[in-house]
Image: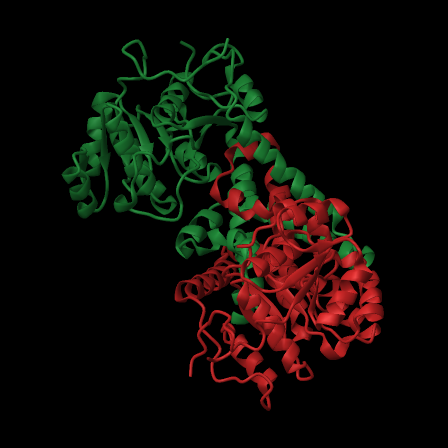
Chain colours: A red, B green
Amino acid sequence: MTAPREPASPRDPHASIPVCVLGLGLIGGSLLRALADAGRPCFGWNRSAATVAAATAAGYEADADLAAVLARASEADALIVLATPTTVVDDILDAVAQHAPRCALTDVVSVKDAVAAAVDRHGLSARYVGGHPMAGTSESGWDATDPALFVDAPWVVCCDDHSDPATWSAVADVAVTVGARVVPVATADHDLLVAAISHVPHLTAAVTAAIGAGPGDLALRLAAGSFRDGTRVAGTAVDLQRAMIEANRPAVVTLLSEAIDRLVAARDDLRDSGSVATTVDDGHRARRRWEDMRAAGPQPIVDVTVGAPGWAAELRRQAHLGRVWTGAPA
Amino acid sequence: MTAPREPASPRDPHASIPVCVLGLGLIGGSLLRALADAGRPCFGWNRSAATVAAATAAGYEADADLAAVLARASEADALIVLATPTTVVDDILDAVAQHAPRCALTDVVSVKDAVAAAVDRHGLSARYVGGHPMAGTSESGWDATDPALFVDAPWVVCCDDHSDPATWSAVADVAVTVGARVVPVATADHDLLVAAISHVPHLTAAVTAAIGAGPGDLALRLAAGSFRDGTRVAGTAVDLQRAMIEANRPAVVTLLSEAIDRLVAARDDLRDSGSVATTVDDGHRARRRWEDMRAAGPQPIVDVTVGAPGWAAELRRQAHLGRVWTGAPA
């Protein structure tokens, strides 16, 4: 039985769970807007009075009083979404543990290992399921928010053997509600995966740009498509890139070592045998695989009932085949 | 005095020089079409009768008899453009030396050191000026030709102290006629420049793609903009990439070593100090420099009369500032 995506309906047990978004930057603010526009009860907190004023003026419920917002979340049994910068996660979790310790909890931070450990230190693991929407990194702040930001974007919802099924379903439902494609991933796997498809690409783009600019403006004048596309993300704000990459240190170090090994092999093959066949073939096959997956479109995860025996392992198994969760079976 | 680009006029000494294009693939075929469409007398040769038939049917002058085409070029004192694959350059130069040894000669091959050496071995250096339009690598053959291929594209026209001024002007005029921006480059510098902005970017794209696909379809399902753009050129046909990169072995080996050094520094900085500041800053600065140059548009080379004392050095000096040759002063 396939599991097609369904709009929220009165029969949907998650449709009425309120959502409390902590942090109204690009991701959190876009989420608040998308959920409110979809008719979901939701409210947000941001430290900056200016952001709260902007969100309120735009018709959304927002407040700068963290304790009051968390008290409301606790009373409403809301799902709390942690959408602040990594650097303040510990402070926010202090407040959550104090004011709303029994709420379901997720986050949209770009690494999972460190966040899960912090959640554990605060005694909040039982109802925590980590998340990570793969959308939007080159702009920031409420002014950059867009309720369509998540449409067709992959959204990791962490899925471990001990994950609470009700929380997992609530988090996945939020992602589906705003148009994302839910990808179930083991928490322990997440950081290496995003290092592979996002953090390392940022660093190889930076190195490619520096090599291209090395000979000076004459070289840059000759630059065409390969430089233009290959270095685009090197133009992303430096502090955003650093925050993302440096928070994922162990995984990025591991995969940078693999990238170095591959470039050394390319150089040695070219120098010694005049061939770059292995490097070019491997890269071509990888790119074509991605293109083929895009062309085929998302394949849905099928025949899983969240909470049934082995549900988490089965979600992960199908996700490894490239499939996505598009909502609970009708 | 600035040197704005001017359309060919009856006063233009180069406007009536016929052009003989050897090889009617993507680059040569597009050039024949663009020149003919601009009213320039031109004719082409291709080994394949099917390509000759297609070009002829499209209204262009083409022939599969190399000796006859070169005899016609010799008689008309045409500028010969070598547009064949690198692998057959020596054979073609044999024929040129036999049938049209006194014609001005250029090429559109992606490396210059090896071609210049081959031209020298055939005793054809006196009227040879190397060239390289930075346009189009992902498709090939007559069917892919496009007379607009060169519009606003950089076109390297090699410029050494011993270059024949009349040939240089004739080659530059061909590039300007088809809409390109001429970049004067010392033959000895060319191969490292294109390694920096094209060949190394192809290899870093290949490695980035392979790293991204390493964890399997699950990782590729999560891939977003940084993977999409950073690996685009890895999808180029493998044989085209290999031919281009492997022909430029010494320069690519040199710059791959620099790329390796930069990635090792990035990994060690991240592992030892938790920072990727240097790598991200260097890449960001390089990318922004390129974006700034693009936004400012091409700045023209000024106050140079081709053939006047020191003309070649002055063209190279201004090209190092990122300027382009847009045509002879009016």
Question: Does the image show residue A205?
Answer: yes
Toward the viewer: B264 or A191? A191
Q: Position of residue B155 (x, y in %)?
A: 43, 31
Above or below residue A320? Residue B43 is above
Which residue appears at 55% of the width and 57% of the height?
A37
In the displayed orientation, state which residue is furthest to the bottom. Answer: A309
Residue A218 position (above or below residue A178): above
Q: Is residue A309 above or below residue A96?
A: below
Any part of residue A272 in sight: no
Q: Quadrant of the N terminus of chain A?
A: bottom left
Q: Is residue A115 above or below residue B187?
A: below
Left or right: A201, with B144 as reference point? right
Q: Position of residue A90 (x, y in %)?
A: 82, 63
Does B159 sit left or right of B175 as displayed? right
Q: Residue at x 30, y 32 (%)?
A: B97
Q: Position of residue B232 (x, y in %)?
A: 48, 52
Foreground residue among A6 and B199? A6
Answer with left or right where residue B217 lies relative to residue A136. Answer: left
Residue at 41% of width from left, 14% of height from top? B328
